[in-house]
Amino acid sequence: MSDEADGREYPERPLVGVGIVLIREGRILLVKRAFEPAAGKWSIPGGLVETGETLAAAGARECEEETGLKVQVLELINAFDMIDLDDEGRARYHYVLVDFLARPVGGEETQNEEVLELKWVTYDEAKELDLTKTARKALAELFGAGIT
């Protein structure tokens, strides 16, 4: 689905998104994004909040859709803006993002069409990957400023 068709590109108002930092045995689950605004970059699982859905429920749903894993949301990590301006200064993408820490509680690891690859990594390994700015921010909140 194109960004224009679903209203993500040049939105009328900011979109609310959620991300999940999923940790298992000291490793973080990262996904390689298939679509813009972060195609080809590594990120944490997540997506948009649906009407009538809580932030935590949206995070759990998005994580399961993208990775096949059911999660227990543990705590809020951060909330921030992600604004990508075009050459004319217009907001091409504008998200209000809320990230949560979670742990896996079931399911089987798979990926949907939004994900090119899944990878469990240590924090040090994550620092070496081509991460999205928002994933760097979430991981820095948990593990320290050294990831930026």
Image: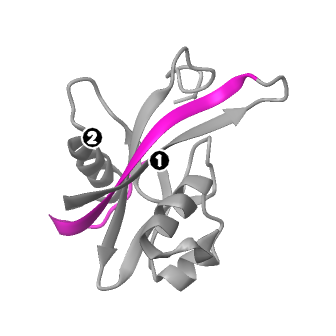
Residue 93 belongs to magenta span: yes
Query: Viewer-nearest of labels 2 and 1?
Result: 2
- Position of 15 with respect to 105 (left or right) is right
Q: Place residue 49 in its image quadrant.
A: top left
Q: Amino acid at mark 1?
A: Glu
What residue would you read off at disc 1? 114
Residue 13 belongs to magenta span: no
Q: Which residues are magenta?
A: 90-113
User: Residue 55 shows which numbered tag?
Assistant: 2
Q: Earlier in the sequence, mark 2 or mark 1?
A: 2
Q: Place residue 118 in its image quadrant.
A: bottom left
Please provide percent x and percent y for residue 117: 49, 64
**Of 63 and 5, the residue lying toward us:** 63
**Of 146 and 55, the residue lying toward us:** 146
- Position of 72 with respect to 94 (left or right) is left
- Name the residue furthest top: 12
